[in-house]
Image (tube, helix red, strand yellow):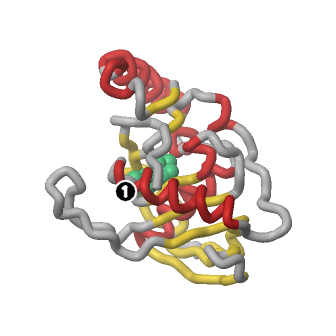
């Protein structure tokens, strides 16, 4: 159990193509996934990619069903899901628009269009190969997380004008909150 600091844009680790996990899922990878899940719950995220905690590896955790508020003591885990070396094998023609946020772009939100459904092949927590189909928020979230493994942030889907505006707002946000986030974020 550990809560890891979150790397904030424009940190270079967020721009790298993450390395595939070679030789199967080990206890070391499982410890990273457990810590990522704790970190995700502690920060109220619904997904987290390893590069966001400074590990350039193709590992993700998701839980879009978590409910309640950790500060109020009403926080409940939904269904945590773990993905190692995920690959999108199919996307629907149908698109969906969500107002996205990102723990690495704190305080900023924008609408992003992505396929409404997708199929993903991956190794699970135990290292077994699986393929699942996702839709709605889950599909949006896994595509957002997969982007992180390829050095892409949700703001990279916006026009240059909107992206520059959000990055300027982010710089102001990090300056304003510098004291509060010194231990929880890496700038
Ligand atoms: O917590 C998160 N919420 C969210 C909302 C809409 C679309 C994507 C996301 S993912 C984000 C957590 C995060 O930054 N994951 O990389
Ligand atoms: Ni993100």
Percent x, y of residue 7: 53, 35
Which of the 4 quarters of the picture holds residue 74? bottom left
Residue 147 coordinates in the image, percent (x, y): 62, 52
Q: Is residue 111 left or right of residue 91?
A: left
Label 1 beta carbon less than 8 Å to ligand 1: no
Tell which of 108 and 22 is nearer to you: 22
Question: Mark 1 highlights which residue?
Answer: 41
Decide if residue 121 is in sight here.
no
Furthest toward the left, the residue is 72
Q: Counting other residues with Cα less than 10 Å from the Cα at mark 1, is it few (<14), some (14-19), or many (20 or more)?
A: many
Q: In the rendering, at what x and y percent does residue 40 appear?
A: 42, 54
Q: How many marks?
A: 1
Q: Quadrant of residue 82?
A: bottom right
Residue at 38% across, 67% down: 64
The residue depicted at 66 percent of the width and 30 percent of the height is: 12
For residue 29, say whether it is visible: yes
Answer with the quarter of the image where residue 172 lies: top left
């Amino acid at each position: 159990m550990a809560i890891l600091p979150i790397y904030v844009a424009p940190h270079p680790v967020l721009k790298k193509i993450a390395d595939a996990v070679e030789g199967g899922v080990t206890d070391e990878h499982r410890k990273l996934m457990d810590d990522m899940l704790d970190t995700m719950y502690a920060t109220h995220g619904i997904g987290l990619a390893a590069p966001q905690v400074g590990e350039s590896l193709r590992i993700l955790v998701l839980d879009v069903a978590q409910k309640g508020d950790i500060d109020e003591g009403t926080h409940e885990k939904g269904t945590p899901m773990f993905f190692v070396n995920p690959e999108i094998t199919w996307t629907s023609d149908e698109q969906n628009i969500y107002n996205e946020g990102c723990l690495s772009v704190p305080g900023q939100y924008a609408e992003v269009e992505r396929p409404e459904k997708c199929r993903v092949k991956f190794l699970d927590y135990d290292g077994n190969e699986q393929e699942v189909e996702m839709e709605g928020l889950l599909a949006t979230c896994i595509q957002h997380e997969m982007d992180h493994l390829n050095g892409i942030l949700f703001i990279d889907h916006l026009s240059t004008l909107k992206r520059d505006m959000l990055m300027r707002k982010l710089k102001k946000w990090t300056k304003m909150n510098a004291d509060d986030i010194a231990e929880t974020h890496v700038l």
